[in-house]
Image (spheres, rainbow, N blue to C red):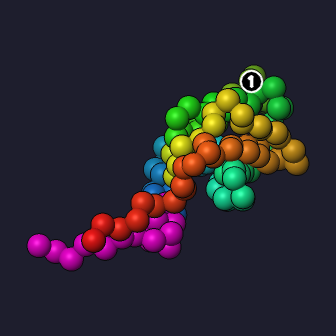
């Protein structure tokens, strides 16, 4: 059996960049704009004290066009932007789902949009540890 190893952040980031390049090349082959919503949409998740903080770069949006839903261990962020062009209207949409590393208090979520960044503060459920489970003996 081949040796198995856990992928770290570096390997996952490398795979994401490779997939982004492939999708951009595919879009270019068909004369379509790059398949990146609202430009380079960065995403970070930080643990601070007793909450998780999710930040997504999404410049140029109207806060009323952004939706955030948290259920169980999943965050779903949606947004839509309609702009006028010479040829009519252009609609762009964005959807990002993120699985969280621990159980959260979904009813106490706070979200805001400021300076082109969506910030979502999600409290952890009391008595629940975040992160990966301890390794088995």
Q: Residue, x 45% and y 71% (percent of image)?
A: 8
Residue 30 location, x and y as percent? 49, 43
Residue furthest to the right = 115
Is there any visible trace of residue 94 in the rendered image? no
Reading the image, the residue beneath label 1 is 89
Q: 84 or 51, which is in the foreground?
A: 51
Residue 24 location, x and y as percent? 53, 53
Residue furthest to the front = 127
Residue furthest to the left = 1
Q: 79 or 108, which is in the foreground?
A: 108
Q: Residue, x 52% and y 35% (percent of image)?
A: 72
**Vertical placement of residue 36 versus 88, above or below:** below
The number of numbered discs placed on residues in the rendered structure image is: 1
Is there any visible trace of residue 70 in the rendered image? yes
Q: Residue, x 62% and y 45% (percent of image)?
A: 126
Residue 129 location, x and y as percent? 54, 55
Q: Which residues are magenta?
A: 1-16
Q: Residue, x 46% and y 65% (percent of image)?
A: 12
Residue 61 falls in which quadrant of the image?
top right
Q: Is residue 124 left or right of residue 3?
A: right
Label 1 secondary element: strand
Quadrant for the C terminus, please. bottom left
Instruction: Report if residue 123 lies within the magenta region.
Output: no
Quadrant for the N terminus, please. bottom left
Residue 134 location, x and y as percent? 40, 65
Instruction: Report if residue 11 lies within the magenta region.
Output: yes
Q: 97 or 108, which is in the foreground?
A: 108
**Vertical placement of residue 129 versus 78, above or below:** below
């Amino acid at each position: 059996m081949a040796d198995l190893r856990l992928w770290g952040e570096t390997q996952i980031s490398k795979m994401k960049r490779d997939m982004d390049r492939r999708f951009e090349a595919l879009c270019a082959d068909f004369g379509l704009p790059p398949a990146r919503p609202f430009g380079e949409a960065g995403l970070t998740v930080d643990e601070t004290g007793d909450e998780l903080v999710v930040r997504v770069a999404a410049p140029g949006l109207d806060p009323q066009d952004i939706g955030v839903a948290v259920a169980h261990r999943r965050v779903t962020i949606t947004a839509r932007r309609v702009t006028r062009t010479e040829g009519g209207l252009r609609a762009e949409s964005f959807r990002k789902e993120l699985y969280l590393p621990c159980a959260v208090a979904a009813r106490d979520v706070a979200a805001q949009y400021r300076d082109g960044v969506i910030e979502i503060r999600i409290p952890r459920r009391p008595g629940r540890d975040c992160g990966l489970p301890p390794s088995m003996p």
